[in-house]
């Protein structure tokens, strides 16, 4: 397995597929984006293609959009378009827990077919206008975005809510090779630019594990100078501080001579980072 890699910053066109179970509004999302209108007629799609030019962050892009079949009988057909597409909108309906549960199956099929560990994906919870029929909470949608390492939006094709934003977000991911969502990118840059409500815990762990602790400062109550020891590559070398042991011994003797009275000061507190 390797990581999806595009010369994304230099590209001006992308192939995008809208993927999900049948009857969740994939065609309605696509038509709303392409033609700025809503259709509530359900005509099971086999495969429809569209092209649109759009401006994202003052740059013009051309995207070819494939509206795909969600029915299980078209399983093998999916693999062909998955190979040819650069990014995906993974869609479920907030009124169908089944469509939500099936989303990970589509996701894993995409990774398997493209033989990658990361691919630009935006997760969409469609039909947000059907609040009274909601089966999938907003929190569950956010969690799906975290699991898939992609931004999450609830959309309404009927009212045009977040449709353009979702496509623009996917273009940015394609342009930036996943940006903060692709944990194989520069960890420092990714961590400093995270603006999503979901911060990938694995990315943070990787940052900590790969960090090199350069210095350890040991403070002494008898000296204002600090003893410094370099630790390379996060190794677990043992810190020995004989002067600190002598200080503790003298403190104990002083405590005995004062009949158990003790005093402490902030300078006696040592902070060691290991």
Image (cartoon, rainbow, N blue to C red):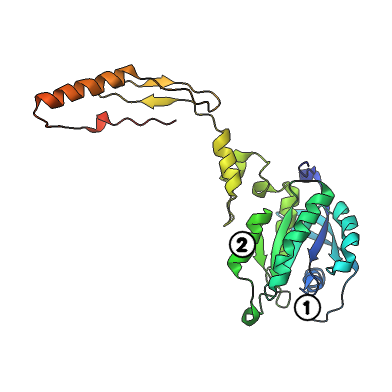
Q: Quadrant of the N terminus?
A: top right
Going 87% across and 62% down the picture, which residue do you hit? Answer: 75
Residue 42 position in % (x across, y down): 83, 79
**Could you say whether the residue bearing mark 1 is in a helix, strand or loop?**
loop
Please name the residue that numbered disc 2 is placed on. 142
Residue 165 position in % (x across, y down): 69, 63
* Quadrant hosting residue 150: bottom right
Of all residues, the one furthest to the left in this rendering is 259
Q: Which mark is residue 38?
A: 1
**Number of numbered discs visible in the structure rendering:** 2
Q: CA distance from mark 1 to mark 2?
A: 26 Å
Q: Is residue 222 visible?
A: no
Which residue is nearer to you in this view: 40 or 71?
71
Which residue is nearer to you in this view: 114 or 224?
114
**Could you say whether the residue bearing mark 2 is in a helix, strand or loop?**
helix
Q: Which mark is residue 21?
A: none
Please state if 24 lies on the left or on the right of 154 as rendered: right
Going 61% across and 60% down the picture, which residue do you hit? Answer: 143
Please state if 29 lies on the left or on the right of 197 as rendered: right
Rendered view: 133 above or below 170: below
Please state if 14 lies on the left or on the right of 261 as rendered: right
Around disc 2, counting alpha carbons within 10 Å, would you say few (fewer than 14), some (14 to 19), or many (20 or more)?
many
Asked whether disc 1 touches disc 2, contact meaning CB atoms under 8 Å apart, the reply is: no
Q: Quadrant of the C terminus?
A: top left
Going 73% across and 74% down the picture, which residue do you hit? Answer: 157
Around disc 1, counting alpha carbons within 10 Å, would you say few (fewer than 14), some (14 to 19), or many (20 or more)?
some
Which residue is nearer to you in this view: 44 or 16?
44
* Quadrant hosting residue 185: top right
Rendered view: 155 above or below 261: below
Of the numbered discs 1 and 2, the one sitting upstream in the chain is 1
């Amino acid at each position: 397995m390797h990581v999806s890699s595009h010369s994304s910053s230099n590209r001006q066109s992308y192939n995008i597929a809208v993927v999900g179970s049948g009857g969740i509004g994939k065609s309605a999302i696509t038509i709303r984006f392409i033609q700025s209108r809503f259709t509530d007629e359900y005509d099971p799609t086999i495969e429809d293609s569209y092209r649109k030019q759009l401006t994202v962050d003052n740059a013009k892009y051309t995207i070819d959009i494939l509206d795909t079949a969600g029915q299980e009988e078209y399983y093998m057909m999916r693999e062909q378009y998955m190979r040819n597409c650069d990014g995906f909108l993974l869609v479920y309906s907030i009124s169908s827990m089944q469509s939500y549960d099936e989303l990970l199956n589509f996701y894993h099929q995409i990774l398997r077919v493209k033989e990658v560990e990361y691919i630009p994906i935006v997760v969409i919870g469609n039909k947000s206008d059907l609040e009274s029929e909601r089966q999938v909470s907003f929190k569950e949608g956010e969690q799906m975005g975290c699991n898939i390492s992609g931004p999450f939006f609830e959309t309404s094709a009927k009212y045009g809510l977040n449709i353009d934003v979702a496509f623009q977000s996917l273009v940015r991911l394609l342009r930036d090779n996943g940006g903060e969502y692709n944990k194989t990118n520069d960890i420092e840059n990714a961590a400093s630019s995270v603006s999503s409500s979901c911060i990938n815990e694995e990315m943070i762990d990787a940052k900590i594990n790969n960090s090199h602790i350069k210095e350890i400062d040991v403070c002494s109550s008898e000296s204002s100078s600090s003893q410094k020891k370099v630790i390379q590559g996060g190794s677990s070398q043992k810190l020995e501080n004989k002067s600190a042991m002598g200080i503790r011994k003298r403190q104990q003797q002083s405590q005995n001579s004062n009949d158990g009275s003790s005093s402490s000061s902030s300078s006696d507190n040592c902070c060691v980072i290991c």
